[in-house]
Image: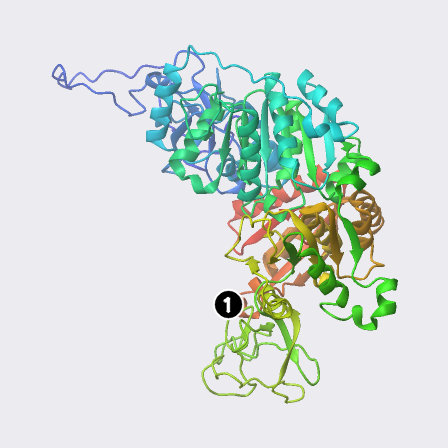
Amino acid sequence: MADTWHEGTAGLLLTDAPPLIAEPAAKLDEPPKPPGRSRKSKDARTLRPAAGQPVARIAVDTPLAHLDRPFDYLVPERLADQARPGVRVRVRFAGKLTDGFLIERAADSEHQGSLRYLERVVSAEPVLTEEIAGLARAVADRYAGTLADVLRLAVPQRHAATEAASAKAAARAAGTARARPPRPAPGPWSRYPAGPAFLSALAAGRPARAAWTALPGPAWPEEIARAAVTAASAGRGAVIVLPDQRDLARVDAALAALLPLASPANPATAPLAYVTLTADLGPAERYRRWLAALRGEAMIVAGTRAAMFAPVRDLGLVVLWDDGDDLHADPHAPYPNAREVLALRAHRAGAAALIGGFARTTELTQLVAAGWARPLGPDRQTLRAVAPRVRPAADDRELAKDEGAMIARLPGLALRTARAALSAGPVLIQVPRRGYLAGIACARCRAQARCTRAVGDSGSRNSGIQCNGPLRLAGPHATPDCRWCGALATTPGNTGAPGNTGPGSWRCPRCGHDMLRATITGAVRTAEELGRAFPGVKVVSSGGDLVIPRVPDQPALVIATPGAEPLADYAAALLLDGWALLSRPSLRAGEETLRRWLAAAALVRADGTVLVHADPALPATQALVRWDPVTFAERDLAERVELGFPPAVRMAAVSGESTAVARVINEMEAAFEILGPVPLEQPATGPAARAAHPGEEQVRALVRAPRARAGALAKALQAAQAGRSARKEGGGVRVQLDPAELI
C-alpha cells in the first residue's frame, strides 16, 4: 500500500528531496576530491533511485497499531541488486533507524510526494517468503493484531556467522540434486479403515484434511513420521508441530528410523530430509536449521509451537499432535494458537492437514462439522484389541462391597489393582496437583485456609486489603504459605512482620481453631502415602521441575502429574482425584480432564487396567470407560452451540484498566454483544498485584459475535486499537481473540 500519511506523521517524507530520478546540480565552488578517496554518499540529494522498480514496500517493525501497514521507500541504485523481496532492511522511521522487511518492489508509488531512501540491506538472504508474509498478514487480521507482532514470532533473529557459513555450504551443494525419499509402506496406518487412503492422497498431492483420533499405544510417532515422509516422497514439504520436547524427541526418532541417511546433527549428510527445531538448540544451531528449511535443503520440519511458521518449500502437509494442549497457544501478542495457524496455512497453501491426538477438541469437531476436515479414526474392533480395560473405582459392584469407595481417596479396589499389577510391571498413578498439600482447611469448621496478609500501604487507596490467597503446605513440617503472594501464614490482627509469625501461628478467622486438614493432596504426599502402603516397592515421582522421561519396565509405583508421565509399558494406571480436574472453574474442564486421562491411559498395555477415581455417571468418565472422545466432543459442541460459547461463536476478551476497556467496548456496543466488564480477581491480577501496581481497577469484558461475523469482530478490534494508538491514549488494553479460558 502506498504511503498516504501527511507529511511529518512518521518522519518518512522528505520535502526538499529531488524529483524521482532527478540529478542534483553540481557545486562549482567545491574543489574536486582527490582520486582514490571517493566514497558513496548516503545523502538523499546525491543518491539515485534504482533504474527498475525503484519503490520498495517495507513492513516496519513498529508496535504502534495505527502504523500497521507497508510504507514506501526508494531503493538507491547501489542497493538495486540486494533489495529483493523478503530481505531484512534498515530504514529511517519517525527519525530513528528501524528494522523491517522488504515486502515487494514496485515501479511507482501512489504517494505524490517525496520518499526517503532505504538506509541499508542488513542481509541479502530473503528470509521472509511470500507464503509466510501472506500467512503472517492473515494471522494478524484473524487475531486483531499487527503484522510486526506476527513477524517477530515467524522469523527468528539473524545470526550473521551462521548465515554466512550456511550460504557457503549451500553454494558448494548447489549442483547436487536433493533426492526424494522413497514412499514408505502404510505400517501402523493399516489399522485405520481410511489410513491407506489418506496416505495415497498425500502421495498424489491432494489436500486431504483429517481429524485424527489416534489409537492408544506407542505407535503415533511412527504414524506421523510415515505421513510426513509420504508427502516428501511426492516432492512436497511437511511441517510437524508438537506440544513439548518430549513428544518431539519421539517423532525425531521415528523420522530417523524412516530416513536413516538424514541427520539434523550432520549438515553434510545428503539428503538432509528433515530438521527439528527446539528452544534448547541455541541461536546459532536453531538458525542454521531454519535456513536449511528456507533454502529447500530440508523437506520436513518438526518442532514445537514456533515451527508452525517454518518456511518449508512447496508445503504439502501440516501435522498437529494433541491440539488441545495449552502449550500450542502462544503467550505473545497476538496470542495465536497453532491449530488455527496451521489450519489457515493449509487452507491458503492447498496442503493436506493431519490434526488430532488421543482426544478430540470441540474446535476440531467444529472443523469436521463445517466440512473442512473429515474424521480419521479406528473401528471399534481394533480399538478394543489395543486399548486397556477402563473401569471406575466406585462402580455399583464395588460400592456393594465397600460403601466408602466413593469418598476414599485410595479405595480398596485401587490398592488391590496396584498390588496385582506390580507383579507384571510398573504402575502409573496420576495426581492432578504437584507439591505436598495444595489445599488446606480448618479441621473444625472446614473453612478454606486463606492468606490474611495486608497488601496495601497505610494511608493508600489499597489500605486494608488482604491477599486472600489459598494457603498450602510444602511439606509435613512446613509452615503454611500463600499460593498467590508466597507469604507465610499469619494470624488476623497480628502486628508483627507481615506473613512471618512462625510455625503454628495460624488460626481460623471463623472459629479460632489452629488445626488444619488436607483438602487437595499433591503428588509428594501421595508418594509418601503409597510408600507406606507398599513397603519395599520402588516409588518414582515425576512432575514440576523434575520430569523423568522414561522408567524401566520393572515393578515400581510411578507418581506423576498430568503431562509429566514417564514413558513405560505400564501394567496398570490409577487416575486419582478426578474431582479436582472436573471442578476447575473452566468451560473446558470436562474436555481437558478427558484429554489428560486418555494421555495417561494410552501408556498402559492392552491387557492392563485403568482405574479412574471419579463419579461414574459423569460424561467425561463415561467417555473414558468407552474410549469414545468423539461422541463426548460432539455433545460438548452441541451444548456450546445452544449456549453461545466458542467455538460455536467468536469471542474476544478485552482486559485492562477500566477506563481504557470502557472506551474500546463503547465503540463496539452497537455491532456486537458485550458481556461485562467485570473485575479481574486472579492471582496475577488480584489484590496483591493491584497493591504492587497502584492504578485503576483491572477489568475484563467479553465481546461475542456469530461465526459469520468473525472477520468483522477482528477488524473492529483492530480499528479500536489503532484509534487508541493514534490518540496516544494511556492505560494498557490486552485484546485476545478465542481465549482458552473465558472465566
User: What percent of the width, then of the height, locates residue 393?
Assistant: 78, 61
Determine whether 488 is above or below 91 in the image: below
User: What percent of the width, then of the height, locates residue 77?
Assistant: 35, 16
In the picture, the quarter occupied by the N terminus is top right
Answer few, some or many: residues within 10 Å of disc 1's Cα (few below 14, many 20 plus, some between 14 and 19): some
How has the structure been colored for display? rainbow
Residue nearest the observer in this picture, 557 or 632: 557
Q: In the picture provided, is 122 more to the left or to the right than 646?
A: left
Determine whether 479 is above or below 338 in the image: below
Inspect this view and state whether residue 323 appears.
yes
Inspect this view and state whether residue 583 appears.
no
- The amino acid on which the numbered mark 1 sits, given as a three-letter code, is Pro
Most extreme residue toward the bottom, as rendered?
Answer: 512
User: What percent of the width, then of the height, locates residue 375?
Assistant: 78, 33
The residue under label 1 is 694
Residue nearest the observer in this picture, 499 or 288: 288
**Badge count:** 1
